[in-house]
Amino acid sequence: MASGAEAGPQFVDISVNYLKNYILFRMISKEFQKRRQALMEQMEPDSLAILFATPPSIRNRDVTYFYRPDSDFYYLTGFKEPEAVAILTPGHTKTEYTLFCRKRDEKKERWEGPITGPQEAIEHYGADAAFPINELDKRVPKLLERMQRVYYAVGSNPALDQQMNTWLNNIRLKTRSGVQGPKEIRLLDQYLHEMRLKKSPTELATLRTAVTISAQAHRLVMQNCNPEMTEYSLEADFVHECIRQKAKHQAYSPIIAGGNNGCILHYEANSGILKDGELVLIDAGCEYDYYAADITRTFPINGHFSPPQRELYELVLEAQTEVLKKVKPNTSWRTLQQTAIRTITKGLIELKLLDGSTNTLSKLIKTKKYKKFYMHGIGHWLGLDVHDVGTYKIAKKWRALEPGMCFTVEPGIYISPDTPDIDKRWHGIGIRIEDDVVVTDKGCEVLSYQVPRTIDEIESLANS
Ligand code: GLY
Ligand code: MN
Ligand code: MN
C-alpha cells in the first residue's frame, strides 16, 4: 500500500498495532479473570472446581482432528492447548487459580509448534500457580483431601470421570488414617452454563465478527449461484470466504441442499447438482475465535422464485418476522415457539395444505398437524457452541428472555415428494430462514441483518 516515501509511518502503524494487540490481550485476560471470579463467588466454602481440557480426538490411526478446546474450559481460562486442567479453590490463600499444562519441550515444539508451559501460564493466563501436567496425580488428591465439595462436569467424558473416580476412591481407602474427602459433588454445568447464557460485550463483539463473516459468505454464494453448479462448489465458495477472513473452521457441517435435499433437515452430503427452477437451502456459519454463527437462507437457483416457492417463502418469512417482533426481555421462550406455530398453521390453512374446513386453527395447533411441514423448534441458544448451553426452562417453566441472551430464530416449511396427499406443485420445496439475534434492553438486534431476507432483496442480489 505504501510508496517508498511512506515507509516511515508504516513502522508507526506496526507498533501501534502491537500496542493495540497488547491492550486487547490484557483486556481479554481480565475478562477471563472476571469469569473465574464470578464462578468462585457462587461456590460454597471449602470447595474446589475442576475442569479438564478435552483430550484430542483421533480421526484415524495416528491422525487427530484439529484441536479445539472444550468450550467450558476455554470460557474460564482462555487457554487453548490440550492436556490441561484448571482448578479453582476460592478463599485459598494466594492460589485460587491453579493451571496444570504441558511442559515446554524443544523437540516436541519443533514438530507441533509452541507450548505455553507453566511459567508462561502464570504470566499470560493469570494463573496463581501452574504445574506440569504430569504432576496432576501427585497434587490433586492432596487438594481434594482438604475439600468438602467438588464442582465438576460429571459424565461429560468417561476418561475424565475415571480419573476423578480413581482419586476419590484412593481417598476412601485412606479413611482409617483419618483422611476425609469431599462429601458432595455438584454439577459445575448449572453454574457455568447460566453464566455462558448471557453474553458479555466482549463475547458479543466476537460473535458479531463470526456472524458478519458468515453473512458476507452467504451473500457471495447467493450472488454467484447458477443452475448446473454443484452443491459442493457452493460449499467451497462459502468456506473459502470464511477462511479468507480468518475464520478457519465452520461451526458445524454446512448444509448446501438443492431441491428435494432441502427437505432433509440435517443433509450434509452436499454432493448434488443444482437444478434450474429449484431452490437451494444453505445453512452455514463459521466459527470465529471459538464463537459460532448459524445462518440459513433459501433462494432460487436461477434467481427467480416460482409462484409456489414464493407463497411458501412469504409464509416462512412472515413467521420469522412475527417471532422477531416478540423478542424482548421477559418474553417467554414458549411464546416464540407458539408464535411461529400459529403463523405457519394459519398460513398452511390459507394455502389449503392443512384442512381448515373441518378443523379450527386451535384444533390443528393442538393436534400438532403443522408437524407434517414444520417439525423442529424455533431456535436455540448460540455462543461458544452452535447449540449453546443454558436451560430453556426454570423450575419446569419456559424461561423469560433477558438482555444479552443470543439465539437463532429459524422457522421452516419442508414438503418432500413423499409427503402424503400433497399436490405436486409443492413437492421439493424446503425453506428455512435462520437469523442470529441478541436480546437488548428494549427488544433485539438481528446480528445477521446483512444477508437479504425478503424476496425482493434476494432476487435483487441474486441477479446483480
Ligand atoms: N445449523 C444447525 C441448526 O440450525 O441448528
Ligand atoms: Mn440453528
Ligand atoms: Mn442452522
Image: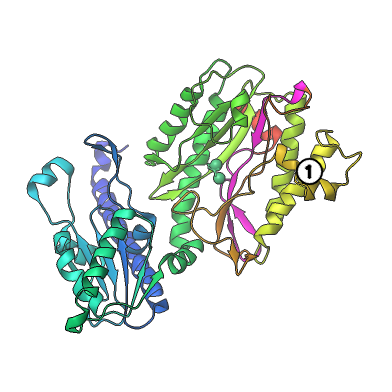
Residue displayed at 48% across by 48% down: 386
What x and y, as percent, mark residue 426?
74, 26
The outermost residue toward the front is 176
Query: In the rendered image, which residue does mark 1 sit on?
Result: 345
Q: Is residue 67 above or below residue 233?
A: below
Compared to residue 153, the image places residue 245 above or below, namely: above
In front of the other: 341 or 23? 341
Q: Which amino acid does label 1 sit on?
A: Thr
Name the residue: 69% across, 55% down: 336
Task: Give how far across and how far down residue 357 sits, in percent.
Answer: 91, 38
Q: Eyeballing the image, is 83 above or below 240?
A: below
The question of residue 254 being in magenta is answered with no
- What range is drawn magenta here? 424-452
Q: Quadrant of residue 410?
A: top right
Is 332 placed above or below 253 here? below
Write down the quadrant of residue 247 in the picture: top left
Q: Can residue 148 be seen in this view?
A: yes
Ligand 1 - quadrant of the structure image: top right
